[in-house]
Image (cartoon, grey):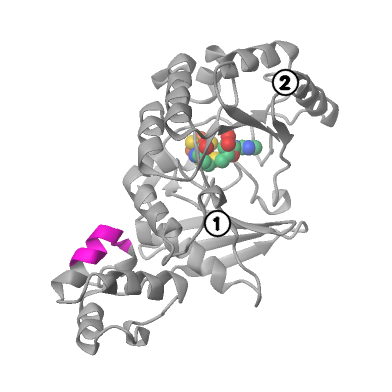
């Protein structure tokens, strides 16, 4: 039996473990600094912890690592990593440079249970949740692959999986990503994207201090029901209430992601429905032209159709952007991630 990964311990559990070894509370903070800031590969390196404590930690825990199985580089500069987990399962993370930012897109599950019709990850079904350690290790492993002087500036939970379905591990990972002695990311540097688990959105407002994105994609129930089964559980009216609650609680806007499908949600009546849904919400809109992949059921709208849709929203004073996905040529773009036979 291999030892448990210390990176799977939430902050509180780590504090209790260290206290149990007779160390002062501050030792827990020193430990997270060694793990996530200095990226120590062994307990031996943690020289400001007592020798006895280092030994006890090493007897009890491992410092787990993901195995980098494969890397693909896109012509646009993005890099897709295929990582192997300890049980042999595989996940992907994508690194995307943009101006002075370097964003890492992380996975939260192996596969996904949500079954969205347009997403390649959905065809895997849910294999399992990722642990806290596996979520955080994606960031450390990507950092190890960087050129000297490069630094990850932003994290988005938009890889494989529905982050709010793996709620506890995502929340505890966020605490370490945000902790000044951990990774130290600012609240505007992290975005969690959800397909619309309304109850979890409400709770997320209380538990996390990062940006939230919602994969809206459709503003009418019949079409959203068709492409996103989650809409049958939480239809638009219920989802809208959850967003409102989040807006009120956090005073933050929500980024509405709207994947555009040719002829299906890019028409003038879709603009009207979208405006109606957003009418009492604080929101920004990201239009994402659909990324096709082998066997994908939908088509990408023409450039002109995307621009028209964008203009209609901008004319109505919405803050709206067109987001062209990176990594299309390496199947690393939004909705293209999947590992194993699909
Ligand atoms: N499960 C979460 C996060 C991962 S998906 C969620 O659904 O929000 C990240 C984004 O990619 C979502 O906004 C989703 O709508 C979008 N997406 C999925 N498949 C896509 C595709 N084929 N082309 C473009 N965007 C896609
Ligand atoms: Fe899961 Fe998001 Fe893909 Fe839907 S779009 S299947 S929620 S990963």
Q: Is residue 175 left or right of residue 157?
A: left
**Residue underneath mark 2:** 266
In space, the residues marked 1 and 2 are separated at their CA atoms by 30 Å
Residue in the image at 44% along x and 45% along y: 209
Mark earlier in primary sequence (1, 2): 1
Say above or below: 121 vs 277.
below
**70 to the left or right of 233:** right
Magenta stretch in the rendered image: 8-16
User: If the image is split into quadrants, where does the N terminus sit?
Assistant: bottom left
Magenta-span inclusion, residue 71: no
Residue sitting at x 52%, y 14%: 221
As helix, strand or loop, the secondary structure at mark 2 comes to loop
Question: Image point 45% across, 40% down: which residue?
Answer: 162
Instruction: Find residue 194 and report its horizontal and vertical position in percent.
Output: 48, 36
Q: Check disc 2: other Cα within 10 Å, few if <14, some if 14-19, many if 20+.
A: many
Residue behind mark 1: 93
SS for callout 1: strand
- 214 in relation to 220, above or below: below
């Amino acid at each position: 039996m291999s030892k448990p990964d210390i990176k799977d311990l939430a902050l509180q559990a780590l504090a209790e473990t260290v206290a149990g070894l007779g160390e002062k509370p501050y030792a827990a903070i020193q430990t997270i600094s060694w793990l996530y800031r200095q990226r120590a590969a062994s307990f031996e390196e943690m020289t400001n912890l007592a020798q006895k404590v280092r030994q006890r930690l090493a007897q009890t825990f491992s410092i787990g690592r993901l195995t980098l199985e494969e890397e693909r580089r896109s012509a646009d500069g993005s890099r897709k990593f295929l990582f192997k987990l300890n049980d042999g399962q595989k996940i992907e993370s994508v690194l995307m440079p943009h101006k002075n930012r370097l964003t890492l897109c992380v996975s939260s599950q192996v596969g996904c249970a949500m079954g969205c019709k347009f997403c390649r990850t959905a065809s895997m079904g849910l294999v399992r949740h990722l642990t806290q350690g596996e979520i955080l290790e994606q960031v450390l492993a990507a950092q190890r692959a960087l050129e000297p002087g490069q630094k990850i500036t932003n994290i988005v939970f938009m890889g494989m999986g529905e982050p709010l379905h793996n709620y506890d591990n995502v929340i505890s990972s966020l605490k370490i990503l945000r902790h000044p002695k951990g990774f130290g990311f600012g609240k505007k540097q992290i975005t969690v994207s959800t397909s619309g688990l309304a109850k979890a959105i409400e709770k997320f407002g209380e538990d996390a201090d990062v940006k939230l994105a919602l994969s809206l994609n459709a503003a009418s129930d019949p079409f959203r029901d068709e492409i996103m089964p989650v809409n049958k559980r939480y239809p638009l009216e219920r989802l809208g209430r959850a967003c409102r609650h989040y807006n009120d609680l956090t005073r933050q806007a929500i980024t509405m992601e709207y994947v555009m499908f040719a002829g299906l949600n890019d028409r003038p009546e879709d603009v009207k429905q979208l405006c109606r849904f957003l009418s009492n919400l604080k929101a920004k809109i990201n239009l994402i032209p659909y990324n096709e992949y082998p066997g994908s059921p939908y088509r990408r709208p023409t450039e002109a159709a995307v621009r028209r849709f964008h203009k209609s929203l901008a004319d109505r004073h919405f803050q709206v952007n067109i987001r062209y996905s990176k990594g299309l040529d390496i199947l690393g773009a939004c909705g293209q991630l999947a590992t194993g036979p699909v």
